[in-house]
Amino acid sequence: MIFAMGLSILITNFLVKSNPAFFIIYLFVVIVAIIASVYLSNQYETFMTNEIIGTSLSEFTGASFIMLNLPLWTTVIGVFGMIFLFAGILRDRGLGGSVI
């Protein structure tokens, strides 16, 4: 589910046209998301070292890998999402519009 959500962000950003004026807002949102992901990742690591719920969390290997490396995942998805959103690729040059 976590990986699918990241993939859907990239696909949606590729298909939507956005005004370049929103670049700064998108950049600030990505920076805030990276800062928040550091706190979430550290808290998840604290939960994994807990005796009570740590064994249950360690069973989810894929989700644990993503949560422990959440700042990296957030940075990569945010930067590539920004590139896809503001690249300005014309999908149908003959009609002068996008796919949607």
Image (cartoon, helix red, strand yellow):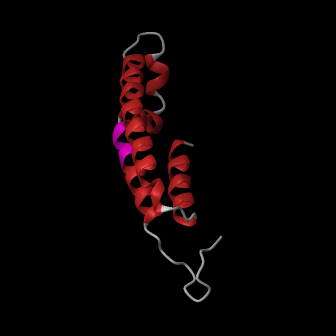
Q: Relative to 86, is 95 on the left or the right?
A: right
The extreme front residue here reads 21
Query: Residue at the spot x=38%, y=28% of the render?
Result: 41
The extreme top residue here reads 51
Between residue 46 and residue 93, name the one nearer to us: 93
Between residue 1 and residue 52, name the one nearer to us: 1
Above or below residue 88? Residue 92 is: below
Image coordinates for residue 95, horizontal then vertical, percent: 62, 86
The extreme bottom residue here reads 94
In which quadrant will I find the N terminus? Answer: top right
Q: Is residue 76 magenta?
A: no
Above or below residue 32? Residue 81 is: below
Q: Where are the magenta residues, as a range?
A: 71-75
Q: Which quadrant of the figure has residue 8?
A: bottom right
Between residue 18 and residue 47, name the one nearer to us: 18
Q: Relative to 5, is 52 on the left or the right?
A: left
Image coordinates for residue 76, horizontal then vertical, percent: 37, 50
